Amino acid sequence: METGLGEKVVFITGASGGIGRGLTEAFAAEGARLVLQGHRQFDSLCEFVRQAGLEERSLLIDADVTNPDELDRAFAHAASEFGRVDVCVANAGVWPPEDVPLWEMDVDRVREVVEIDLLGSVWTARAFLRSLARSGPREDGHGASLVFTGSTAGRFGERGHTDYALSKAGLSGLVRSLKNEITAIDPRGRVNMVEPGWTVTSMARPALENPDNIVRAVRTMPLRQLAMAADIASAVVFLASPIAARHISGETLTVAGGMEGRLLWDRDEVDPAAIVAEFRK
């Protein structure tokens, strides 16, 4: 499928994480030029890009997504290097692994998760739209694209992780609002979200070492498997494409094996060992 992403400039936040690395590889495979943001794991991001042989196509930026000024400077730097930014993937996020009910949750934890996962996405979108307003739409008619990385926690909730669930739920309102705003600066501009369920990443692996967590997650899915980073990245690439998804805006694409808010399988119908063996291949 032709995506039209060759030589497009793609800005990815949280590029140092598991999904972020999957996004980097997927957009690189489409021939895009990459602007990769990292912060806490910036050194590991640099090493990943070097090992992947992507240094010539990548601009690496150390910026804090909770700081609007740093993001404005990051997008200005990207535009000065590549001329413009065509696609933005607001992917940066954190998920504290400890299960804590809200009434026992530390205020600092709530603030940190909301600052990174929700407000970090707001400031990323703001900086991207400001950059787009300066550059204007492309002459070839390919619209700009803004894609958020959400979570099924924002739809179904997640016990013990209210901070994360509320942050991801807030992205839905952002998508629905910005789809109407982006067209004021780019008539073909689009805003969408990919909503992953349980995905095998470095962030989730500690929780997935517990077979009970795997069983609890997979029992809600007709597809008894866990997503890999590449599964999420493929969905983002599709939505980012000005050709494949040119008439899709304001939508959420769930990548979660058909997850529902109910149990579909008995416990003995899920084999966590087989699932673990699959994602360790």
Image (spheres, helix red, strand yellow):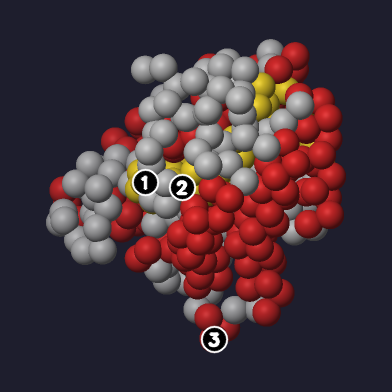
Q: Amino acid under label 1?
A: Leu
Tell me whether circle 1 and circle 2 mark residues in contact (CB < 8 Å). yes
Residue 271 — which label? none
Instruction: Assign the C terminus to one quadrant of the image.
Output: top left
**Residue identified by numbered label 2:** 192
Q: Choose mark 1 or mark 2, whichever is in front.
A: 2
Q: Can residue 145 be seen in the rendering of this structure?
A: no
Under circle 1, the secondary element is: strand
Percent x, y of residue 177? 51, 61
Real-space Cα distance between discs 3 and 1?
A: 32 Å
Instruction: From this view, report whether residue 137 is shown above or below residue 71.
Output: above
Give the residue at x 68% y 72%. 111
Give the residue at x 38% y 38%. 247
Tell me whether circle 3 and circle 2 mark residues in contact (CB < 8 Å). no
Real-space Cα distance between discs 1 and 2?
A: 8 Å
**Residue identified by numbered label 1:** 253
Q: Choose mark 3 or mark 2, whichever is in front.
A: 2
Between 18 and 36, the residue placed more toward the observer is 36
**Residue identified by numbered label 3:** 103
Percent x, y of residue 132? 68, 41
Real-space Cα distance between discs 3 and 2?
A: 33 Å
Q: Amino acid under label 2?
A: Asn
Instruction: From this view, report whether residue 158 is shown above or below residue 90.
Output: below
Tell me whether circle 3 and circle 1 mark residues in contact (CB < 8 Å). no
